[in-house]
Image (cartoon, rainbow, N blue to C red):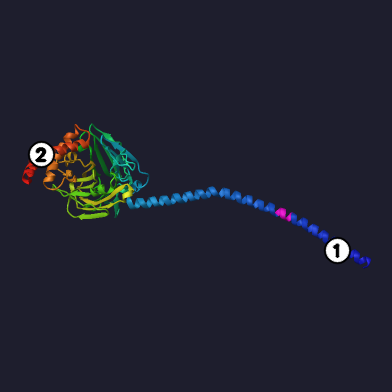
Amino acid sequence: MDKKSIIGIVAAGLLFVGFAYFNSREQQKFQREMAEYQAYRDSVALAERAAAEPLAEEADSLAAAGIAEVARQRQAEQWGEQLAAAREGEAAVFSVENDVLRIDFTTRGGQIAGVTLKDYTRYAPRGHRDRPVELFAPESARFDLEFYVKNGLRNVKVNTMDYLFTAEPVRRDSTAQIVTMRLPVADDAALVYEYVIHDGGAPARDYLVDFDVRFENMAPRMANQSTIGIAWSNTSYQNEKGFQNENMYTTLSYRFPGESSIEDLGMSEKSKDKKVSTAVNWVAFKQQFFSSVFIAPDNLLGADMAFDTAAPESEMLKSYALATAVPYTPQTAGYDFAFYFGPNKYAILKKVTAPDGEELHLERLIPLGWGIFGWVNRWFVIPVFDFLRNYVSSFGVIILILAVLVKLIISPMTYKSYLSTA
């Protein structure tokens, strides 16, 4: 190879190495510039997002508020301003007590949500009887009035359980506490519930809760209708150790107006129902030893009644349901109802009467036996038992004394039977 060729090859190599070095420097410079540019863009984007997020949240909030406002406007158009407002919010729960009862009220539906009997205890799984008797589970309680009101050209169905009532401060007098709850239907019209809890030391009154329903300026607001619907339901607890025995005496009972006897749905380990098309004076969710009774002195327009039996291991006993109605005219100012929450005790139930003094025959909730046995229990066994209870604290001793007395009374007949046999 000659000298010129060598010089050419070396010059080409130097040129190639120089180009490669220069190109590498330019590439690194370009990459640094691109990285700096990308970082700049990322910082700008981050700043834009940071600035946009409050705006987006505000936009979402405004959108949600707009949707809520539209919903409220539609509800107001559908039910009216007062009823639409009463559908919103959380229910308040409060209690009122007398010597024998504690009654829990809720503003949801303006109803009684729970009843505790202070003088009685129920069976506990470990055998202790240290829990007071509660007549029904609060979450199952439902008392609902159904009627129609006018809203413009439309008739709107009102179910009181869908609304929050306004509770007024509890009023007290010498013998009673008065709970008033109000559901505004319009600016000048309202449905008013008034509960009277007596505390006069007389069990026949103290276990009885007067329940007055009043329509304040409601007539112009009410739609054309001839009845007001009533739905009442709850689920009772198991109070005794033996589920089957307690279930045998637990049923739904009712009385026809003017009758001294009562009817019931009988006993079932599953469910039963019955529809009565004639007037009914009262309906009782009857347990073995306690009852919840809805009393309508002016009678109900028939009754659709049912119960369902709970599983033995559930600590519940039966779920009751009543669907009925009362008559309504534009002149109707309200209704005078009552509840009995208490023991199935003959001496107490016998004294529970209607406001006009009419006998309600609630004592028929106690099965006294057929024929002559019922008369003996009613006029001898129960009065003697109540008399002895004032002086003897042990039920076992009272039963022993009763057995001896009955034996002495029937001894002449027994003696003659012995002689005849001999």
Q: Examine the structure image and report whether residue 378 is included in the region drawn in magenta.
A: no
Q: Which mark is residue 24?
A: none
**Can you identify the residue that label 1 sits on?**
12
- Using the image as rendered, state which of residue 380 and residue 300 is in the foreground: 380
| Residue 70 showing in the rendered view | yes
- Using the image as rendered, state which of residue 332 and residue 122 is in the foreground: 122
**Can you identify the residue that label 2 sits on?**
409
Determine the main secondary structure of the stretch shown in magenta: helix
Residue 180 location (% of width, % of height): 28, 39
Residue farthest right in this picture: 3
- Disc 1 on helix, strand or loop? helix
Q: Examine the structure image and report whether residue 31 is included in the region drawn in magenta.
A: yes
Residue 5 location (% of width, % of height): 91, 67
Q: Relative to residue 329, is residue 39 drawn left or right?
A: right
- Disc 2 on helix, strand or loop? helix
Identity of the residue drawn at 7% across and 46% down: 421
Residue 220 location (% of width, % of height): 25, 48
The residue segment tinted magenta is 29-33
**How many numbered marks appear?**
2
Q: CA distance from mark 1 to mark 2?
A: 144 Å
Residue 121 quadrant: top left
Question: In the displayed structure, would residue 17 be above or below residue 328?
Answer: below
- Please name the amino acid that badge 1 sits on: Ala
Identity of the residue drawn at 78% across and 58% down: 23
Identity of the residue drawn at 33% across and 53% down: 78
Residue 56 location (% of width, % of height): 52, 50
